Image: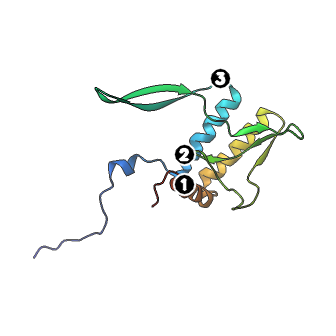
Amino acid sequence: MLQLKFSNEKKVLVSEARKKSPRQVVLDGIHNQVELLKNPGFTVERVRYRKETEDGNTRQCINRQPQPWFWKSAKDGNLLLEIRYGRTVVELQGQGMANTVIAGKTNADAIKVLEQIATAVKAGELDEPLEAARIKAKHRRGKVE
């Protein structure tokens, strides 16, 4: 008989290999927010599919501004921001706690805060809240694991 070694590992599907990690999703979002703070006219290319009666689906590329994660406080004029995984707020301090970050008075202050958060994401310090936000976003779309 042949001397073979066996493994339980399955082949990775192409659809799984293309998926971004939660870290990469948030880092891309932070990059978009930094660009939006630097240039209010910043747009991102999005792909939309339309159902056509004759040809099936057609692919259409459109440019849209990213949804801002920041806003001005009505009380003191500070910029406030939330870190998001798609449309889901990442609960940085835990569920039920305040997750809005005070970013300062100017756009430059907000950019510094976003860069600090990006460094923490790259270092893996926020992996647990990012995974919780990924699961929450998946539940919202009805794709329960």
Q: Residue at x 58, y 59 (%)?
A: 132
- Residue occupied by mark 3: 41
- Residue occupied by mark 2: 25
Q: Where does residue 106 sit, x and y in percent of width and height? A: 81, 33
Looking at marks 3 and 2 on the same chain, the residue that comes earlier in the sequence is marked by 2
In the drawing, what numbered circle is on residue 44? none
Looking at marks 2 and 1 on the same chain, the residue that comes earlier in the sequence is marked by 2
Near mark 1 (Cα within 10 A), the count class, few <14, some 14-19 or many ≥20, is many
Label 2 to label 1: alpha-carbon separation? 10 Å
Q: Is residue 123 above or below residue 25?
A: below
* Amino acid type, mark 1: Arg
Q: Quarter holding the N terminus? A: bottom left
In-front residue for pair 105/56: 56
Q: Where does residue 40 sit, x and y in percent of width and height? A: 68, 25
Q: Is residue 47 above or below residue 27?
A: above
Q: Is residue 92 above or below residue 20?
A: below
- Marks 2 and 1 close (CB-CB < 8 Å): yes
In-front residue for pair 49/69: 49
Give the left or right position of residue 76, taking residue 71 as reference. Answer: right
- Residue occupied by mark 1: 134
Q: Residue at x 31, y 28 (%)?
A: 53
Q: Quarter holding the C terminus? A: bottom left
- Based on the displayed image, in which of its 4 quarters is residue 39 positioned? top right
Near mark 2 (Cα within 10 A), the count class, few <14, some 14-19 or many ≥20, is some
Looking at marks 1 and 3 on the same chain, the residue that comes earlier in the sequence is marked by 3
Label 3 to label 2: alpha-carbon separation? 22 Å
Give the left or right position of residue 33, taking residue 72 as reference. Answer: left
Residue at far front of view: 53
Q: Residue at x 45, y 26 (%)?
A: 61
* Amino acid type, mark 2: Val
Q: Secondary structure at mark 2?
A: helix
Q: Where does residue 56 sit, x and y in percent of width and height? A: 30, 31
